[in-house]
Amino acid sequence: MAASPGTKLCTGMECIDRLVGGGLPVGGMVSVCGPCGSGKTFLAMEYLLRGALAGQRGVYISTVHSPEKLLASMPRLDRAEGDPFKDGRLAIKHIDDMGSGEREDGKITRPEASAIVEDIAEAIDGSKAQRLVLDATNPLMLEMQDWVARAFLVSLSKLLFKAKCTGLLITEGDDMQGLEQTMADGIIRLGTAVRRGDNYRVLEVVKMAGVAHSRAKYVMDMTSEGILVTPMLRGL
Amino acid sequence: MEEVAPQVLGRLEELGPAVSLDLNISVEAYFDTLTTLIDRFCNKKQLTCIYISVTVPASTIKAALGSLEIATDRLRFVDCISFATMECAPSDDAQTVFVESPAMLEYIVLKVEYLFRKGKGERFMVILDSVNSLAAHNEVRMLYEFMQVLMASVKSRGAYPVLLSIGEQMKPEVHEMLQLVCDQIITLK
């Protein structure tokens, strides 16, 4: 059964839930974008770990690092019980193990893009996942012509909605004009703000379908209690 | 000079938690005030003390309290000065979290919040040492906004918020700001 419009997934991350009025749209596809070192992967990992703590299974699909490397650098949250990757609550997969690997002139063909989506569907169904992370979309999009990338994202969006699985698409860079942002149900932008020579990690919700969300900039800190945020001071 | 301890303890008992209190002290009363707050109030009441150090590095305060055989196991530091002086050693001290600069006010709020969460179920006092040092690194308008956010956060946790300020070194605009954000200002004589 497909997700009902208007229902929300409480992520368990206060930094997100508070800013978007309770949670992300169930079965939605949310883009998390930002430059290197802005905390995208940390946010994605916390999203899955909080889900596991609440009994929700999740799948992390990497297009960059190997599962072994990701597991070695996994953030540790206080009060987390057991290892959700060992006991099966969470799974890590690499995109190279999905589809057939077939390329035409170095590009992913339309049938190959469909095969990747089918394998993602299998990963979601197999583990009954309610949360998905695709980190990062850039290498995948680089291998696709625009029309194939669009078809891939449309199929992924439909799949997530049908499976009631809420997905985060992690995108490297400040560019908000990408296909991922155009087609996403929500956009969370991470970045760096500079004030008097000091660098601040910042988070803002640019778009979230169907909810009145905060538009303010928040300073964020990545801690063993998860991501914490506070409004950026203006000194007005 | 009257003894500091009875004045501080009496007023804290009278006001209770979640009331923001500025202790306007002289330089001579600084250390007596600290030991009173930490040893005779926090330790006695079994409160966890979150100490925001902007004037002196956390390690120095801890060493000074240690030399007086005052228990420091309930102390948690938000050290805003050691990074700037390149004296921090984060891995050495589980009781201390660091903020890179006293001008990064949002991170002070976030580190205090982090310590609240780490100490889930504990009762807290939050000491800001000092308003003068923070004012040296920040514009008053920014400081005002920061104080409002910090005080709201501390009060919502039911903690005791205590600000230390040195009267003789204070700019008039900082004093005005304190009058706006503090529920009580006490000048210790």
Image (cartoon, coloured by chain):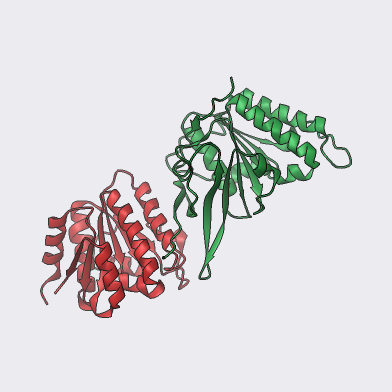
Rendering coords of residue B146 (x, y %): 37, 62
Rendering coords of residue A221 (x, y %): 48, 54
Task: Please tell me which residue is depicted at 23% across the width and 73% down the height of the picture.
Answer: B30
Rendering coords of residue B140 (x, y %): 36, 71
Q: Is residue B177 left or right of residue A77?
A: left
Chain B hue?
red
**Direction bottom: furthest residue:** B168
Rendering coords of residue A5 (x, y %): 54, 28
Task: Please tell me which residue is depicted at 54% across the width and 25% down the height of the picture.
Answer: A4
Task: Please tell me whether residue A66 is drawn above or below residue B111 in the rendered image.
Answer: above
Task: Please tell me whether residue B98 is drawn above or below residue A186 in the rendered image.
Answer: below
Chain A hue?
green
Task: Please tell me whether residue B96 is drawn above or below residue A26 in the rendered image.
Answer: below
In this rendering, does residue A31 appear at all?
Answer: yes
**Direction top: furthest residue:** A1
Task: Please tell me which residue is depicted at 42% across the width and 40% down the height of the picture.
Answer: A79
Q: Quadrant of residue B138?
A: bottom left
User: Which quarter of the rendered picture does the N terminus of chain A lie within?
Assistant: top right
Task: Please tell me which residue is depicted at 20% across the width and 74% down the height of the picture.
Answer: B29
Q: Is residue A165 left or right of residue B106?
A: right
User: Which quarter of the rendered picture does the C terminus of chain A lie within?
Assistant: bottom left
Q: Nearer the viewer, residue A44 or A30?
A: A30
